[in-house]
Amino acid sequence: MPPKPRRSPKPHERQRDPERTRKLILDAAAAEFSAHGYVGARIRAIAARAGVNQQLVSYYFDGKEGLYQAMSERWRERQRDLVPPGTPFPEQVRRYALEALRDPEGPRLMAWSGLEYTGPTGDPDHTARSQQLADSVDELRALQESGRLPADLDPACLLVMLMAAAMAPTTLPHVIEGVCGTDPRSPEFIEHFADQVALLARHIGLDPT
Amino acid sequence: MPPKPRRSPKPHERQRDPERTRKLILDAAAAEFSAHGYVGARIRAIAARAGVNQQLVSYYFDGKEGLYQAMSERWRERQRDLVPPGTPFPEQVRRYALEALRDPEGPRLMAWSGLEYTGPTGDPDHTARSQQLADSVDELRALQESGRLPADLDPACLLVMLMAAAMAPTTLPHVIEGVCGTDPRSPEFIEHFADQVALLARHIGLDPT
DNA sequence: GACTTTGTCAAACAGTTGCTTGATTAAGTT
DNA sequence: AACTTAATCAAGCAACTGTTTGACAAAGTC
């Protein structure tokens, strides 16, 4: 008989690897939730995508809701260490747009949860994310006080408007298809659009000095 | 026995009024689809909201898909006669924002269908809507050629960005809640935000002269 | 008045959904 | 080797989905 590979302490051998399984499920969940939203996502599809049995989802996470929470939290953690501080703001915006458009998984998740939003809640998901954004608002406010940004603009609103504008090819692809006449997901257009968002920020009154 | 109200030719009497029923269903559908999106909307809920039997939905429209189409088309028609031509552009933007935020049903429908968008298609829903927007793009282009708008901005992209920005309280309410610290649906904030969008348009280089 | 068409309903049907159960096998412990 | 725990699976269940069926009464037609 074939010699059973006596479990040497190398966990790469692809059998009974809980860490790997968790990750597989979380990745699949991110893809599926981002594609179809919370209601539209199917546990069966996630399991299939991850190549594991459906029950493992309930085994590792607490059902659909638990999986969604875990997935969002992981995504939030990842995002945390992605902001490079000290970049001039329009360029920061352009990079954000580029990043958001090249890999729309995050923006899509944000958009879905925005539409599913029912009212002011103490949802940790929201408060956590807004913490990061608060820094950007401070930065904007500082720029404003140094006179490099019109005084009548509300920094917080401005940030949100720029975010929404940057996410447009993700949230309003059909409008873009109609108005611009191009595939909103083609790399050329994405780059063009990111430039436009940066230009918008610049024309508000902010040169990267 | 009670004298059966011999069908006098007054169709207001609330029995067997197909026109009324159709409208009830369409209204309920708009509310439900706008609230939960296509997948999330429940036919049972629509029927209940309209106060009619569930089967009538299949009777009058061709199932869920048909109902959705009919509902979108009606909405599109309504929108068509709502654009007041000849208004200075920032004010036009401000009004659009205000309208979009006071009654978010339309923007929500647009956002849902954007997320459910799968790729470039000849969907009449999209092409129809973009026809209206094409006019606004032309207007922007004209302003640009008369030198009242920076030459490096792409009018089509600009329009989309402004739309997305204006819709932000609808599409990203959770972000606003976190960043601005207020209820994104309160009338005061909505007015404030609409002003901000108009200001944004104005600061790009366009005074309402 | 008999007959057809139209608007409406209650009930049920076939297909999915997320989740639970019970069993099986690998890994760890003694 | 015996035993416990952890990881995995296949099968099935109750609830829910959009749609269909079959009935029936109001309105229209002759």
Image (cartoon, coloured by chain):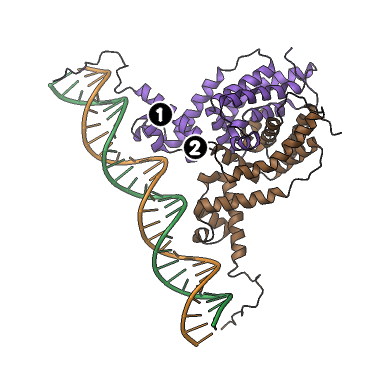
Chain colours: A purple, B brown, C orange, D green
Q: Which is more toward the observer, A61 or A28?
A: A28
Instruction: Identify the residue at image location x=69%, y=35%.
Output: B163
Report the chain holding disc 2: A
Secondary element at tag 1 = helix
Amino acid type shown at disc 1:
Ile
Count of numbered circles in the view: 2
The answer to whether one can see residue B30 in this image is no
* Horizontal and vertical percent position of residue B205: 80, 27
* Horizontal and vertical percent position of residue B106: 65, 45
Instruction: Identify the residue at image location x=75%, y=27%.
Output: A154
Q: Quadrant of the N terminus of chain B?
A: bottom right
Q: Establish whether labels 2 and 1 are both on one chain.
A: yes
| Circle 1 residue | A25
Instruction: Identify the residue at image location x=46%, y=36%.
Output: A65
Pointers 2 and 1 in contact (C-beta within 8 Å)? no
Which of discs 2 and 1 lies nearer the camera? The answer is 2
Answer left or right for B126 relative to D13. right
| Circle 2 residue | A36
Amino acid type shown at disc 2:
His
Residue A181, quarter of picture = top right
The answer to whether one can see residue A84 in this image is yes
- Spatial CA distance of label 2 from label 1 is 16 Å
Residue at the right extreme of this rendering: B209
* Horizontal and vertical percent position of residue A3: 17, 17
Instruction: Identify the residue at image location x=59%, y=17%.
Output: A83
Residue A86, quarter of picture = top right
